[in-house]
Amino acid sequence: MMKQDRPFPAWAAAAAALCMFPGVALAALGGEEASVEADLVRLQGVASVRQAQHYATHEIAQPGGVSVRQYVSPAGKVFAVAWQGPAMPDLRQLLGPYFDTYVAAAQAKRVKRTPVVIRESSLVVISGGHPRAFSGRAYVPDLVPQGVDAEALK
Amino acid sequence: MSAPAFRGASVVALCATLLALGGCGGGGGGGGGSSGGGPAQPIQNTQPVIVDAGPADTVNLLFTSVTICAPGSSSCQTIDHIQVDTGSSGLRILASALNSAALSLPAQTDAAGAPVVECIQFVDGYSWGPVKLADVRIAGESAGAVPIQVIGDPAYPRVPANCSSSGPPENTVATFGANGILGVGNFLQDCGAACVSSTSYGLYYACPGSATCQPTTLALAKQVPNPAAMFGSDNNGLIIDLPALPPSGAATASGSLIFGIGTQSDNALGTATVIPVDPQTGNVVTVYNGVSYTDSFFDSGSSALFFGTSLFPICTGAASGLYCPPSVQTLSAAVHGVNGVAITVTFSITNADTLFSSNPSFTAFNDFAAPSSDSTSFDWGLPFFYGRRVYTAFEGRSTSGGTGPYVAF
């Protein structure tokens, strides 16, 4: 079923321009789009790129069913990432320099066995689910392009 | 404070186990039953469970005790404060809670004969340790030579980078929050078919040496299984039966873990509604406030209700990160099974800062919620389980309410 709480993102209109090519891979949050190629070896899967009005979405579907998405701004920065699948993704790779912040926040929780929620001015990470169905997303507020609602990225 | 009482209850259960089995040397996977003349006595299928502060000062974690033995031997140990988790499958015990000198457990091996070590991923961290074989006994139920994970075993100190990259380590009692976890979710194994043919989930490693681990595939029968599905009887599902709580919570909450669905007089489905779950993910659909949460699940191992909404402010005090509505909110949602069956669930949320500060020693809360990972996820955690009998039916197993996987309440 479609969720109904948020407007459909602007790139929906551009989805018709969906193109598939295997030369794109994952860059870490906050990294340069140009660094994407360097990570190609790490992930073996089908990559796709969708162009929206204010950003591009690079998605990689890994063989085990985990899909990861990176959102690249017009300035060429990965400003957000998201993941979904039966296993956890390589968060060290996906979050890059923010991985240690994520780990520290996850360890600091008083309440165990809960989604990990970080809402700081420099970083937002929300990670949830259970074995066989994990999902999460992260973004750097300072890198989000103008006109983009980072909470509504799909 | 409540822990000694709990251990006392565990001892009673253990004695019942020993009586049922005629001693600790029961060995293989049989389900007890009568060995002499006369009618067979039903197997004792009920195990006490409790929510208390546990070994790591936690809230809303549900615990029980589990007895494990070296396969076929009378060398056994009962371990308390094992978390009861319907969100995962597999028995896992922290190495530090095991008396490894008295309890020598053989290693699980892969097809090439190398010891198997697992990287289990939970939502808030990973746990690393070898898979071993043990006889498992809970209440009067038993299963022989069950693969279980021993977390934080000093024999395998080096965690592969691919494992540690999924989050923070939870390899000690303090970081894990319990002495172990009893994963009794819908699935028969922790991984299933995916790990038979692929290493992409990153769960299983072959470690011919303590520091030379490589990802490995693993046959279904060698994977870490839901131990309740391995019992010789009452193995098609289970019930978690917890008391209702007052709105302010309680110091502790005691209830029952009842094995089997419709197999004995104490585990009939009754009027419960059967809600089939997605056979791949265990998920259902929850509709709340006009929003359809398509990744929704029932999880005794989650300490709160987790769902995203902008209706409630976030706590800033002791319960930072949880929802803090100004007053108690009585809400309702519709849960839809994958077959279209729908049932309405009423629940309440109160100010978690107030809950924590009013009764700082309380550990059981039924109106306790927090934001979730995204706008499609609705996690019916432990607060949902209070005041209900919640049935979890295992995948492919026949029950009086149909074939699993399903949840019923």
Image (cartoon, coloured by chain):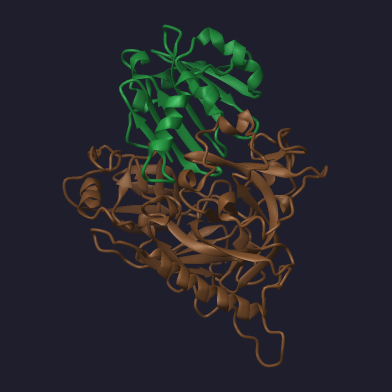
Decide if residue B54 is in sight here. Answer: yes
Please state if B345 lies on the left or on the right of A63 as rendered: left
User: Chain B: what color?
Assistant: brown
Quadrant location, the C terminus of chain A: top left
Decide if residue B279 is in sight here. Answer: no
- Residue B307 image point, x, y percent: 35, 43
Q: Quadrant of residue A136?
A: top left
Compared with residue B70, is residue B265 higher up or lower down, i.e. above or below?
A: below
User: Chain A: what color?
Assistant: green
- Residue B353 image point, x, y percent: 23, 46
Front in this rendered view, residue B300 or B357: B357
Name which residue lies at 71% across and 56% down.
B105
Compared with residue A85, is residue B81 higher up or lower down, i.e. above or below?
A: below
Name which residue lies at 72% across and 85% down.
B35
Please state if B406 lies on the left or on the right of B73 as rendered: left
Quadrant location, the N terminus of chain A: top left
- Residue A72 image point, x, y percent: 45, 14
Q: Residue furthest right?
A: B112
Please state if B341 lies on the left or on the right of B71 as rendered: left
